[in-house]
């Protein structure tokens, strides 16, 4: 009976942790200084300043020129722009922005336009299809799963056959699963929306994601054995739930402890910019830096010569 009680407590504890880190991010979401811009000519500047003064803590307004506001939207420094003009107001959105950020921006900007006594027309730059909005996070999750299954499979097969993969074989597996994973994702892109670009930039970024993920997984599996799944498995559940939201909608604790470092957000947001033909967005350069660093560290850890013994069902290399 003690064993059953212990298993019940462990099961409940795991459910509590995963619930806190997945559903908790959504249940506690609320706007907190969401970056938006108001663009107005000099004659309408007082009206723009008046709106900005009533934003509260939920919105961080930026009053700018039309050109400056659109440049900030292209850089994802803001999630939407309310342009004031003599012929009425225009809400400018971008398909390259996280869909949740776009949704919040449209709601707030529509309310701001209504407060001025009229309706605003909506203009979307770099428009994204339903597949285009879904593809970045989906691709990141699929590439994570591909590397995870391949790496864990190598550990399990090695333990059963008492054969130990060499660093060269582990590196070959990373290369193989990365190429195969990118091929699968590219096939899904073509199936979901034939207009999604599959150029060298997109395919190269997908390959970098795949290598970075598989290398980090391979390094942890090499040194921890199958026990690394206790880290890598929950990451698949936790990271997409966090990376799918904009940080300004997350509870500050989730923002600092999860969103700030999850590799899924660097993968998804950089890929989103490339798919929507905005390669100059800062998140592309940031993603290249972070994912490149993960790939280098992971590949070095996997490729180091020497034997690593992991007890009780682990592996050695």
Image (cartoon, rainbow, N blue to C red):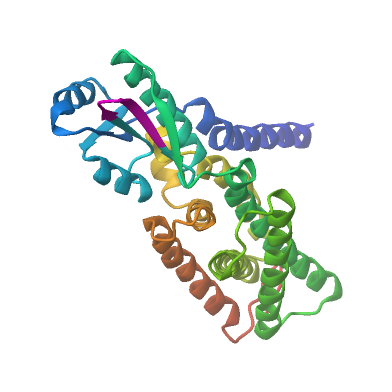
Residue 92 coordinates in the image, percent (x, y)? 39, 36
Q: Residue 17 vs residue 226: left or right?
A: left
The image quadrant where one finds the N terminus is top right
- Residue at horizontal 73%, vertical 61%? 184
Extent of the magenta region: 84-92
Q: Residue 68 vs residue 256: left or right?
A: left
272 inside magenta stretch:
no
263 or 190, which lies in front?
Answer: 190
Q: Residue 278 vs residue 60: left or right?
A: right
88 inside magenta stretch:
yes
Residue 52 coordinates in the image, percent (x, y)? 22, 26
In the image, residue 3 sits, relative to residue 225, either above or below, namely above
- Residue at horizontal 28%, vertical 16%? 116
Image quadrant where residue 97 sits: top left
The image quadrant where one finds the C terminus is bottom right
Residue 126 coordinates in the image, percent (x, y)? 48, 47
Residue lying at the far right in this picture: please name it: 161
């Amino acid at each position: 009976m003690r064993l059953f009680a212990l298993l019940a407590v462990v099961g409940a504890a795991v459910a509590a942790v995963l619930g806190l880190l997945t559903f908790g991010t959504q249940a506690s979401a609320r706007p907190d200084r969401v970056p938006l811009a108001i663009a107005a000519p000099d004659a309408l500047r007082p009206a723009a300043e008046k709106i900005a003064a009533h934003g509260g803590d939920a919105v961080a307004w930026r009053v700018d020129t039309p050109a400056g506001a659109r440049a900030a939207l292209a850089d994802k420094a803001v999630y939407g722009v309310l342009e004031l003009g003599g012929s009425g107001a225009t809400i400018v959105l971008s398909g390259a922005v996280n869909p949740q950020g776009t949704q919040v921006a449209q709601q707030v900007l529509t309310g701001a336009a209504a407060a001025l006594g009229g309706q605003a027309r909506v203009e979307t730059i770099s428009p994204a299809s339903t597949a285009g909005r879904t593809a970045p996070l989906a691709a990141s999750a699929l590439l994570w799963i591909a590397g995870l299954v391949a790496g864990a499979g190598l550990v399990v097969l090695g333990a059963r056959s008492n054969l130990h993969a060499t660093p060269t074989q582990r590196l070959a597996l990373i290369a193989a699963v990365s190429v195969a994973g990118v091929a699968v994702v590219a096939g899904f892109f073509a199936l979901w929306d034939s207009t999604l670009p599959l150029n060298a930039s997109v395919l190269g970024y997908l390959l970098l994601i795949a290598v970075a993920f598989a290398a980090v997984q391979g390094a942890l599996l090499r040194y921890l054995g199958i026990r690394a799944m206790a880290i890598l498995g929950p990451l698949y559940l936790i990271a997409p739930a966090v990376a799918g939201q904009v940080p300004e909608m997350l509870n500050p604790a989730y923002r600092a402890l999860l969103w700030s470092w999850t590799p899924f957000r660097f993968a998804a947001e950089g890929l989103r910019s490339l798919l929507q033909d905005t390669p100059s967005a800062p998140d592309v350069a940031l993603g290249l830096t972070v994912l490149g660093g993960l790939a280098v560290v992971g590949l070095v850890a996997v490729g180091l010569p020497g034997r690593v013994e992991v007890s009780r069902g682990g592996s050695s290399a």
